[in-house]
Image (spheres, helix red, strand yellow):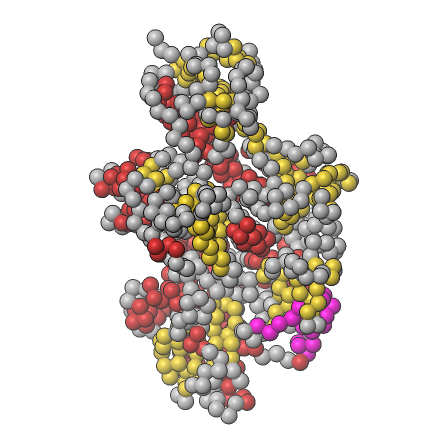
């Protein structure tokens, strides 16, 4: 006789259990309170990208009776009957509780006011969106997320996607206090605050009040926030509202043993609603492990819960964060190896045993690329190289090391699948081993293991496009696609990510598809590009007008000085012979631009992956050693290539003689004057890995020089990978400098006319982005103070005086509030 299994809950863990059991002899009935099928709650914030819930849906279930929109309201354990809200009764032989959790809402006065929401479901996001759309604040809206943990930062990311500038309020003294230590959290705070987000730690909301159409949140620190929306994301609590008469764990959750069985032998509990031997887990990976245990138990097995790997790797607001093992060094005698590179924006900490022989855990912020290699080594002998500053992480992983913690898949299982020919790529490995189908953090390691086993890897841009950036460029150019949505629908999959979206934005801009803040490109841009200015550490922006070749008239200098004085901006001469104006708020940017544009200035594109400057010496105009007019050529080149969007920023210089005062050989393309004309050098750069440029052509006239530069830049833009400088591109180019010379000087591929035509189109179509905003009321409306009414200063931004100018207030230094 067929036995009946009833599952209460259709979340990710309940779905996982049914997925395992659906081909078994059990009749399975699922009660799902939500009206939609199970979806990926871990990726909830990505719903904001498309507002299409179907993109989040998990694999449709077959072989079960799925009762969507049917809440289980009671369980009679004596009769073994579950009753639904509609009155339906289903008798069971086994019952699995997978009711998940509910958001924790702190008892803040005003928490029930309209405009206050929780962040847990798709319906919650729809409600938040409706509140934002109904707000009458012009320009960018303001919101508060109460909770600075993992869920809180996810909620903040969702708000950003809705055009809201979020304040994150965390009671603990740092962000993500459970996963990240003080050092890592400090860097995380600095990185996320560059992304139009304000962090308030060590405080809480004392009250929320209605003020007309707005909400006023008063923090315990004394700060008041003027808001359009409030989101509570301060943690979760196991959902145990069904009255079953079962014992609960110390911190909630149905108390179960190692077999995930309650005191009633016919009732199991899994996921966030379960307290396994008294411990409740709030991550999906332990929930999946519980589902595996119950599936085995229902088949007569003896599998038990193996414990939980609480390691986490995420990309929060575009910032890599990972923690694993004993991240907080709580093991007695534990030692810490910390590398905090504030310049590079990375933090790493390894925790080892007191004899420095065993890896216990670690924290990574800013760059978590080492996570797939490090996490499987927890509890094993630590390679000596890891304990050296900048130590290598490409170490041999033991065969029994767990690569995928979500599904407990070992390296041996993966390599067996590869070597047997069952799996030849990541997709096949996911299908046959389940590795990489949970949180996805182990996917880089899957790629590495494929490579280690001799399987050639794809050069796909990301999981949403099987093409490289160069191939996507050609697709966009040939098909004349003008939007990311059209491109991903026709030539990709899914919704896109923070890898492919900016890359496609660069391609669209390179092909002159309208203003950078146009409808097709604006949603793909990062903060700097969205505001056509560089975000600084205190939430203000810097403005860099273009000064071609570094040449400027006294009248224009006076205008810059007057603008800096009138808006209270800090001024500094840059290394590229321009003047940087620091300390502008978002609402001030258009006012500043208007003054500068009226005086003949335009955007210097210091915020974009584009041409920055063409530096020059004074050349023959003034210098007694000069042999060519370096200033004139620098101005001509900068005006020709201004606004040229590329895979990475571009810098150039022109030196008037071999003395090289403009440092041309340290630039992406640099020109040095000779007695007979010009020498062109390409592929140089400064930075962390300086590289001298290579000589491409010598003693050419100006017309030939410009023609070769046109070809060089367009060939680079078409063929380089995302975020690849010309130096790395040239070094990775098959055939190197010789091949480059054959292509753009000798025209071996017959594409030079096409490259020149593309550059000519760019020159013809160039338009100043600042002026474009000033002439478009819709674009102009975005540049509004996001905390107070338009024109009202942001009270969280403050300055102090230093050497006669205003600079941001730093911790411990007296402030002068603007």
- Front-lying residue, 277 or 771: 277
Q: Is the residue 693 above or below the residue 815 in the image? A: below
**Any part of residue 492 in sight:** no
Q: Residue at x 64, y 46 (%)?
A: 202
* Number of numbered discs: 0
Q: Residue at x 32, y 41 (%)?
A: 401
Q: Quadrant of the N terminus?
A: top left
Q: Is residue 437 left or right of residue 54?
A: left
**Any part of residue 687 in sight:** yes
Q: Provide the residue span drawn in magenta.
A: 555-574
Residue 585 location (% of width, % of height): 67, 59
Residue 604 location (% of width, % of height): 57, 68
- Residue at the left extreme of this rendering: 420
Tell me, yes or no, whether the highlighted magenta stretch contains residue 565: yes
Residue 578 location (% of width, % of height): 58, 73
Q: Is residue 317 left or right of residue 427?
A: right
Q: Residue at x 40, y 71 (%)?
A: 691
Residue 353 location (% of width, % of height): 40, 47
């Amino acid at each position: 006789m067929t036995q009946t299994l009833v599952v209460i809950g259709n979340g990710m863990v309940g779905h996982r259990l049914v997925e395992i059991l659906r081909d078994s002899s059990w009749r399975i009935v699922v009660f799902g309170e939500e009206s939609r099928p199970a979806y990926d709650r871990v990726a909830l914030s990505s719903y904001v990208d498309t507002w299409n819930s179907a993109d989040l849906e998990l694999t449709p279930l077959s072989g079960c009776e799925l009762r969507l929109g049917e809440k289980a309201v009671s369980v009679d354990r004596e009769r073994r009957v579950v009753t639904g809200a509609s009155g339906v009764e289903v008798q069971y032989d086994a019952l699995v509780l997978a009711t998940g959790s509910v958001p924790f809402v702190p008892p803040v006065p005003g928490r029930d006011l309209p405009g206050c929401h929780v962040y847990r479901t798709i319906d919650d996001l729809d409600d938040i969106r409706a509140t934002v759309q109904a707000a009458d604040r012009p320009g960018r809206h303001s919101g508060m997320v109460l909770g600075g943990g993992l869920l809180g930062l996810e909620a903040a990311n969702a708000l950003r996607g809705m055009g809201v500038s979020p304040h994150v309020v965390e009671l603990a003294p740092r962000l993500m206090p459970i996963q990240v230590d003080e050092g890592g959290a400090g860097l995380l705070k600095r990185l996320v605050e560059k992304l139009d987000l304000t962090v308030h730690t060590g405080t809480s909301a004392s009250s929320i009040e209605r003020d007309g159409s707005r909400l006023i949140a008063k923090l315990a620190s004394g700060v008041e926030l003027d808001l359009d929306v409030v989101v509570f994301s301060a943690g979760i609590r196991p959902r145990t509202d069904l009255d079953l008469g079962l014992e609960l764990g110390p911190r909630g959750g149905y108390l179960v043993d190692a077999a995930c069985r309650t005191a009633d032998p016919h009732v199991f509990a899994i996921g966030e609603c379960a307290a396994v031997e008294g411990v409740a887990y709030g991550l999906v990976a332990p929930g999946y492990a519980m589902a595996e245990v119950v599936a085995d138990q229902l088949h007569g097995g003896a599998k038990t819960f193996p414990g939980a790997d609480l390691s986490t790797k995420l990309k929060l607001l575009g910032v890599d964060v990972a923690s694993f093992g004993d991240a907080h060094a709580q093991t007695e005698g534990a030692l810490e190896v910390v590398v905090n590179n504030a310049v590079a924006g990375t933090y790493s900490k390894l925790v080892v045993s007191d004899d420095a022989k065993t890896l216990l855990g670690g924290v990574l912020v800013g760059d978590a690329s080492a996570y797939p290699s490090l996490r499987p080594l927890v509890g094993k002998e630590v390679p000596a190289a890891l304990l050296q500053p900048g130590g290598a992480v490409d170490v041999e992983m033991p065969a029994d090391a767990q690569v995928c913690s979500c599904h407990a898949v070992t390296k041996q299982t993966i390599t067996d699948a590869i070597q047997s020919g069952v799996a030849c790529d990541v997709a096949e490995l996911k299908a046959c081993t389940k590795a990489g189908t949970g949180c996805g953090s182990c996917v880089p390691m899957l790629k590495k293991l494929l490579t280690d086993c001799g399987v050639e890897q794809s050069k796909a841009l990301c999981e949403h496009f099987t093409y490289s950036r160069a191939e996507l460029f050609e697709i966009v150019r040939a098909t004349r696609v003008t939007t990311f949505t059209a491109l991903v629908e026709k030539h990709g999959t899914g919704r896109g990510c923070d890898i492919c979206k900016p890359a496609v934005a660069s391609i669209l801009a390179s092909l002159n598809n309208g203003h950078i803040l146009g409808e097709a490109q604006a949603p793909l841009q990062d903060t700097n590009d969205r505001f056509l200015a560089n975000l600084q550490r205190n939430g203000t922006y810097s403005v860099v007008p273009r000064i071609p070749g570094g040449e400027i008239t006294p009248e224009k200098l006076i205008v810059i000085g007057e603008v800096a004085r009138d808006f209270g901006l800090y001024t500094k001469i840059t290394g590229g012979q321009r003047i940087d104006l620091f300390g502008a708020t978002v609402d001030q940017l258009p006012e500043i631009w208007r003054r500068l544009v009226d005086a003949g200035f335009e955007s210097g594109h210091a915020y974009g992956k584009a041409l920055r400057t063409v530096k020059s010496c004074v050349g023959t105009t003034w210098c007694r050693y000069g042999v060519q007019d370096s200033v004139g050529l620098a101005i001509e080149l900068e005006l020709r290539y201004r606004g040229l969007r590329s895979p990475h920023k571009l810098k150039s210089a022109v030196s008037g003689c071999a003395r090289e005062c403009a440092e041309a050989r340290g630039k992406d393309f640099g020109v040095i004057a000779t007695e007979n004309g010009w020498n062109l050098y390409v592929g140089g750069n400064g930075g962390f890995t300086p590289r001298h440029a290579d000589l491409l052509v010598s003693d050419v006239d100006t017309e030939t020089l410009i023609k070769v530069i046109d070809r060089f830049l367009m060939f680079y833009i078409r063929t380089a990978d995302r975020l690849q400088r010309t130096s790395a591109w040239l070094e990775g180019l098959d055939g190197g400098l010789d091949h480059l010379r054959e292509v753009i000087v000798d025209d071996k591929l017959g594409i030079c006319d096409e490259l020149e035509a593309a550059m000519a189109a760019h020159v013809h179509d160039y338009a100043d982005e600042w002026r474009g905003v000033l002439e478009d009321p819709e674009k102009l409306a975005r540049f509004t103070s996001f905390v107070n009414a338009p024109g009202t200063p942001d009270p969280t931004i403050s300055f102090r005086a230093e050497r006669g100018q205003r600079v941001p207030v730093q911790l411990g230094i007296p402030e002068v509030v603007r």
